[in-house]
Amino acid sequence: MIHLKKGEVDTVAVPNDPEYLALVEDLLSHPKVQEMSLYPQHGVTNCLEHCVHVSYLSYLFCTKHGLNARSAARAGLLHDLFLYDWHTYRPQKGERLHGFEHPRKALEQAAQYFSLCPVERDCILRHMFPLTLTPPKYKEGFVLMWMDKYCSLMETLRRPVMARYARQERRLERGMALAEANRQPLIEPKKRHG
Ligand SMILES: [Fe+2]
Ligand SMILES: [Fe+2]
């Protein structure tokens, strides 16, 4: 059972949630993941804190909705494992800007140090949709993409990420229901007779 307490995620670097931690502790203790704390991300939030926010909120949503919470938690923690300060990033010749490049770089680093399942790979690679044109293949990827944008905004505004989580959760639920409805024809195709 998960108890959502306001401020719990905001005030500590890692949420005090044993069920969540059991899924990601091997990643959290890895030096390459820890290295993310050296790089600023949004506002006063460093890259590791941002990834913990995205990972935990994606985990909460996926747990509640019967999705693959383990993959969402793990991909969330690794989705920005590019390991540099993007504020001072200068693209090399032939490279595009950080926003376009970093999902692939994060995936390459993550795959180098950890074993990733297809859901986790796709979640990391597609998290910048719609900036990068290809959408996520899995629902977990859609959740992570949404939580990444929400956390980025809250961090940039220097607001606690849990403050408006309930509202974001409802928005995401509506978005997913809409996507599901669009996937299925609203009117059943007429059956052919004879
Ligand atoms: Fe990112
Ligand atoms: Fe991110």
Image (cartoon, rainbow, N blue to C red):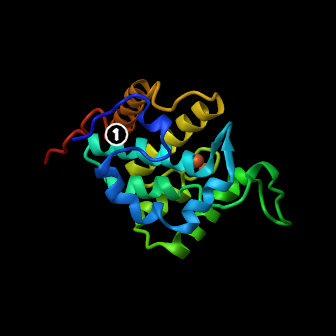
Image quadrant for the N terminus? top left
Which residue is pictured at 52% across the width and 72% down the height? 111
In the figure, 110 relative to 128: above or below?
A: below
The x, y position of residue 51, in whole percent, is 53, 49
Q: Is residue 173 left or right of residue 106?
A: left
- Mark 1 — residue? 180
Q: Is residue 65 left or right of residue 125?
A: left
Which residue is pictured at 33% across the width and 35% down the height? 181
Dividing the picture into quarters, in which one does residue 149 lie? Answer: top right
135 and 74: which is toward the camera:
74
Dividing the picture into quarters, in which one does residue 170 lie? Answer: top left
Q: Is residue 116 visible?
A: yes
16 and 59: which is toward the camera:
16
Q: Is residue 72 left or right of residue 49?
A: left
Q: Secondary structure at mark 1?
A: helix
Give the class, few, some or many, for how many residues have Cα within 10 Å of label 1's Cα (few <14, many ≥20): few
The x, y position of residue 141, in whole percent, is 45, 51
Question: As drawn, which residue projects farthest toward the right?
Answer: 93
133 and 20: which is toward the camera:
20
The x, y position of residue 130, in whole percent, is 59, 44
Question: As drawn, which residue projects farthest toward the left?
Answer: 194
The kind of residue tagged 1 is Glu
In the figure, 53 relative to 104: above or below?
A: above
Q: Is residue 128 visible?
A: no
Which residue is pictured at 58% across the width and 67% down the height? 32
175 and 109: which is toward the camera:
109
Q: Is residue 20 left or right of residue 35?
A: left
Q: How many marks?
A: 1
The x, y position of residue 128, in whole percent, is 59, 48
Dividing the picture into quarters, in which one does residue 60 lie? Answer: top left
